[in-house]
Image: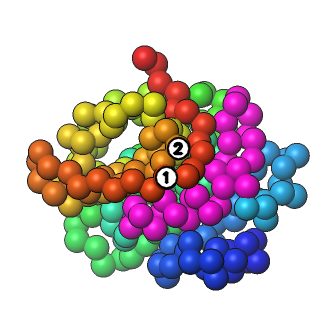
Amino acid sequence: MSNLIDNLIEQGWLKTPRIIEAFRKIKRKDFLPENAKHLSELNEALPIGFGQTISQPLVVAFMMEKLEPDVGDRVLDIGSGSGWTTALLAEIVGKGKTLPAGRQGKVFSFEIIPELMEFGKKNVEKYNFLEKGIVKFFCDDGSKGYREKAPYDKILVSAALHKELPQAWKRQLEVQGRIVVPIGSSIWLFVKKSEDEFQQYEYPGFAFVPLVSKE
């Protein structure tokens, strides 16, 4: 996948060293169904079953750069699907031995489709992130967030909302935290400036499968 990653760097989609390092280490091929592994170098979204896809690498790179995950961050990963974004996040946030007590990076991963949650979990297990306690999977509706482990430094959503941002995500985010989420055909970045103030930025021109929720 190095050619694909090199291309993403050359085209300016991947910029941050820690994110580039994660892309090089976490192989997209490991998160594809057997019949699609040979397509891992394609810069395209690929089907993973149940009407869902593994996102286009360019899009994942763009969203990661806007999210700015860092060592020690606690991340809510919603619509985790194949587990690729979960593993990329875990590789970034779980590093480091000298973090303050209680600040080990964690990724709380939500996938509402049971078979996909199991598929993603099995894929992420290849990198020992569950064994190390960095990743925890939930088969549930991510639109409610996960209050038990809030607040979060970052929230990444990999499927499109058809309406506004859920209040639960806003409440469960740390001040100065970031949410990256597709809404319609745009990717949006929300930065929490205070308990009731968000800066928001829209980046149009993307396509996503819709977020599945219980509503």
What residue do we see at 64% from left, 74% from top?
A: 8
Q: Dot 1 lies on which element?
A: strand
* Colour treatment of the image: rainbow
What residue do we see at 51% from left, 79% from top?
A: 15
Disc 1 residue type (three-letter):
Pro
Disc 2 residue type (three-letter):
Ser
62 falls in the magenta region: yes
Q: Within the image, what quadrant is residue 61 found in?
A: bottom right
Q: Do the residues labelled 2 and 1 touch (CB within 8 Å)?
A: yes
**Mark 2 and mark 1: Cα distance apart in space:** 6 Å
Q: Please state the extent of the stretch shown in magenta in the rendering.
A: 44-69
Q: Where is residue 83 in the image (x, y as percent from the top left)?
A: 60, 49
Mark 2 neighbour class, 10 Å CA radius: few under 14, some 14 to 19, many 20 or more: some
First-in-chain label (2 vs 1): 2
37 falls in the magenta region: no
Say whether residue 141 is left or right of residue 26.
left
| Depicted 2 relative to depicted 210: above or below | below
Q: Mark 1 points at which residue?
A: 204
Q: Mark 2 points at which residue?
A: 185
Say whether residue 203 is left or right of residue 176.
right
Which residue, as the protein is rendered here, is positioned at the far front?
A: 204
